[in-house]
Amino acid sequence: MKKLSKRTRFLATGVTLAALGAGAFGAVSANAAPAAAVAKADAKNKNTVRTTHLTVEAATEAAEATLKAAEKENQRVSVAVVDRNGNTVVTLRGDGAGPQSYDAAQKKAFTAVSWNAPTSELAKRLTDAPTLKDIPGTLFLAGGAPVQVGGAPIAGIGVAGAPSGDLDEKFARAGVASLAK
């Protein structure tokens, strides 16, 4: 078989994609049989993985527990719960929470689940690896805690808005603890 140059492969791929894109409209089949066969083959060959995720209900309950813990100490915070992939499941902005707290809570939750560690611990790693903070979407400040099942991260809870990261993280841990009840 003749080896194609990168440019030729790119052009051929572009033409194929264009052809697929042009022909795909209205040509979607409702037949599920081939997809089922592929799924069985993948499961048989162990090409798939099962993951555990929080339900929206559990994520909401954890976020509410986190917010209640902050309110008990008269703190105005935002809380975010993200799934294993870092996608936001729920975000609550407490009454009076600062405008920056919403985004910071999401980033702390994302950071905690990405490294399966509290963000206060991750912030300490910056002395040895200062470029960690350059990874998009992360925030290496205390206030994020991972949610784990069997030691593996399945979600992250991030809190922002209290006067210290230690308080933010205390509230995030309260949200994690609420899931064990």
Image (cartoon, rainbow, N blue to C red):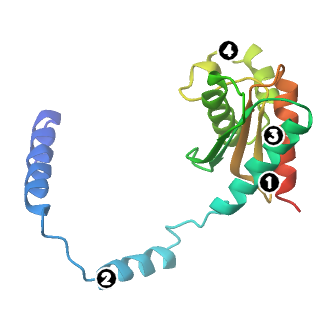
Quarter of the N terminus within the rendering: bottom left
In this rendering, the label closer to the viewer, 2 or 3: 3
The disc placed on residue 151 is 1
- Secondary element under disc 1, as helix, strand or loop, is loop
Q: Earlier in the sequence, mark 2 or mark 1?
A: 2
In this rendering, the label closer to the viewer, 4 or 2: 2
Answer yes or no: is residue 21 visible.
Answer: yes
**Amino acid on which disc 2 is placed:** Ala
Look at mark 4 in the image and give the residue it sits on. Answer: 130
In this rendering, the label closer to the viewer, 2 or 1: 2
Q: Quadrant of residue 98?
A: top right
Look at mark 2 in the image and give the residue it sits on. Answer: 32
Q: Earlier in the sequence, mark 4 or mark 3?
A: 4
Look at mark 3 in the image and give the residue it sits on. Answer: 172
- Determine the CA span between mark 4 and mark 3: 25 Å
- In front of the other: 102 or 180: 102
Q: Earlier in the sequence, mark 4 or mark 1?
A: 4
**Residue displayed at 37% across by 77% down:** 38
**Amino acid on which disc 1 is placed:** Gly
Q: Earlier in the sequence, mark 2 or mark 3?
A: 2
Whether pointer 2 and pointer 3 mark residues with C-beta atoms closer than 8 Å, the reply is no
